[in-house]
Each structure stands twice: as structure tokens, then as C-alpha cells.
Amino acid sequence: MSTKVRKTLTLDSDVVDAFSADDPDNLSGAINAVLQAERERRARRASLAALVADLTELHGEPDRDEVERFKALLG
């Protein structure tokens, strides 16, 4: 488990209300979970960007028409 660090945050009251509704005594846990999810999302995005860069280096720039076609399929 990671070491906990005490920080002071300023949050919008509606955000606090929304996250405190489930467990008013564990707002820190809820905020920590949200920030962990964001950290993981950023790591996945960085990995995907690295993969795209590697593929571009190996195969050249993607065909723009194909990119648009796949975007449409993924909707």
C-alpha cells in the first residue's frame, strides 16, 4: 500500500456532496479512487500514444480516409 500524504484541497460543494453521499466519513478514499482512475487513464493514453508512434515509425503515417472510416465504425 502507498504511503498517504496529507494535502489540503479546495473543492466545489456539489462535488463534495456527491462523493460524501455514499460514505460521508471517507471522502478522502473516494477522491483517492477518482485520482487513481485518472492516473491509470493517463498511463493508458501514454502507452497508446507510444504504440501509435512506433507503428507510424514502422509503417508510415496512417491513411486519413481509413482513420475516418474506423472512427465512424467506433462511433
Image: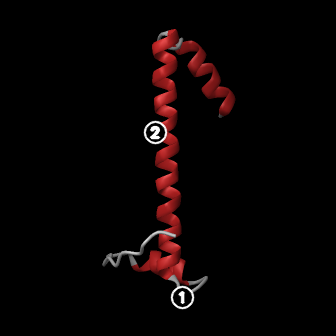
Figure disc tally = 2
- Image quadrant holding the C terminus, namely top right
Residue located farthest toward the bottom when viewing the structure as drawn: 25
Residue type at mark 2: give it: Ala
Classify 4 as above or below 52: below
Classify 8 as above or below 72: below
Return the x and y of residue 8 as percentages of the image width and height. Answer: 30, 78
Q: Is there CB contact under 8 Å for labels 1 and 2?
A: no
Q: Which mark is residue 24?
A: 1
Classify 64 as above or below 26: above
x 52%, y 14%: residue: 62
x 57%, y 84%: residue: 21
- Quadrant of res 71: top right
Secondary structure at numbered mark 2:
helix
Classify 74 as above or below 54: below
Residue linked to disc 2: 46
Secondary structure at numbered mark 1:
loop
Question: Which mark is in front, 1 or 2?
Answer: 2
